[in-house]
Image (cartoon, rainbow, N blue to C red):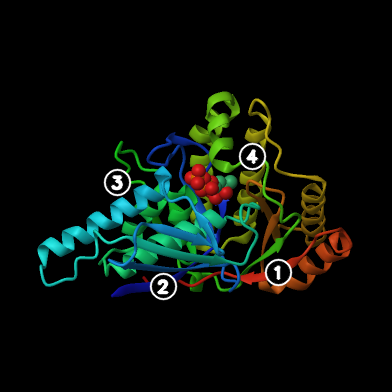
Amino acid sequence: EVYQASTTAPVNIAVVKYWGKRDPKLNLPTNSSVSVTLSQADLRTHTTAACSSSFTEDTLLLNSSPQDVSGARTQACFRELRSLRAALESADPSLPKLSPLPLRIVSENNFPTAAGLASSAAGFAALVRAIANLYELPSSPTDLSRIARQGSGSACRSLFGGYVAWQMGSKADGSDSVAVEVAPASHWPTMRALILVVSAEKKGVSSTSGMQITVGTSELFQRRAEVVVPKHMELMTKAIQEKDFETFGKVTMMESNSFHATCLDTFPPIFYLNDVSRAAIRVVEDINRKAGKIVAAYTFDAGPNAVIYFEEQNLALVAGLLKGVLGNLDGWQGRDIEVQEATDV
Ligand code: DP6
């Protein structure tokens, strides 16, 4: 007999960035972060989890290619989920004994993997929820975020729709380092995002190793974690609650700049932005200058692709100017995306 369950998880793009671990093993961050969950149908990972006594070992296929499941992150997720299932099975002996059976995970995503489009976030969020569904665990999104975090930090935020905070927590065991909802997507229905795929190539320095070199070498990073991010967290949470785009946009851009400044202050330096990224920043500045206020905000993760946040009423202005200036550059694509509603567990 084969037991199976499927789910999908969306990509999220941080507006207050996670960069730095205080505990690399448990994936505990040096600062809290906030993200917006994107809705586009093809910016999701679809995952099916199955288990059966006829399988010989745990396996994971990503876009049809076999992945190593022996890594500490995948193992941590499997172990946590199995132990929750084992607890259910010992409380209710009538349940089928799924926890000891080998798992077969099949994942598909159709956006550029590791191009700075947060594929690991959607990937681990979908993996954790697919297994939780398979095991019929009564876990909340916040419970699952604690597990997904151990797969990839940013994954903990992809278990919610809308506006999501990952609270860094202070406990050594990570039990309070979880994601919570700041506001549902319906709270701010005019919010939109546009992704400029500057390059779909795999990024140079992975976020996992990049952030550890930053933690070890950048003094600017310390100030960011201790002073800048706490201030931005407060401003951003309030801006979302009040639907104050000017503050939302300003903090989003200053956060992205602060994060990339610490990358440059890392030794040896890490460069994620390229000439096209910088051209996109200048176009957004032009848009805001023309509008006389902040109506568009750029943000960049560990790669050159830009995500531009704006409100629906400014779509023509934002998309028109971006396409006019960047449209004829190689490899550019734009996508207009809504914020994702919460998805079911
Ligand atoms: C720049 O979540 O990919 O996108 O925990 O090592 O898997 P690991 O890192 P990851 O880092 C994401 C970094 C970022 C900012 C963010 O999403 O908050």
For the N terminus, which image quadrant? bottom left
Above or below, 96 relative to 127: below
- Per the model, the C-alpha gap separating discs 2 and 3 is 27 Å
Of badges 2 and 1, nearer the viewer stands: 2
Picture quarter containing residue 310?
Answer: bottom right
Residue wearing tag 4: 205
Instruction: Say which amino acid is labelled 2.
Output: Ser
Above or below, 262 relative to 64: above
- Per the model, the C-alpha gap separating discs 2 and 4 is 32 Å
Q: 173 or 54, which is in the foreground?
A: 54
Residue wearing tag 1: 335
Percent across and percent down for residue 95 are 16, 71
Query: Which circle's residue, 1 or 4, is located before the other in the chain?
Result: 4
Mark 1 secondary-structure assignment: strand
Residue wearing tag 2: 6
- Per the model, the C-alpha gap separating discs 2 and 1 is 27 Å
Structural crowding at the residue carrying mark 3, measured as other residues with C-alpha within 10 Å and reported as few (<14), some (14–19) or many (≥20): some
Determine if residue 182 is in view. Answer: no
Q: Which mark is residue 175?
A: 3
Mark 4 secondary-structure assignment: loop
Structural crowding at the residue carrying mark 2, measured as other residues with C-alpha within 10 Å and reported as few (<14), some (14–19) or many (≥20): many
Of badges 3 and 4, nearer the viewer stands: 4
Above or below, 320 relative to 329: below
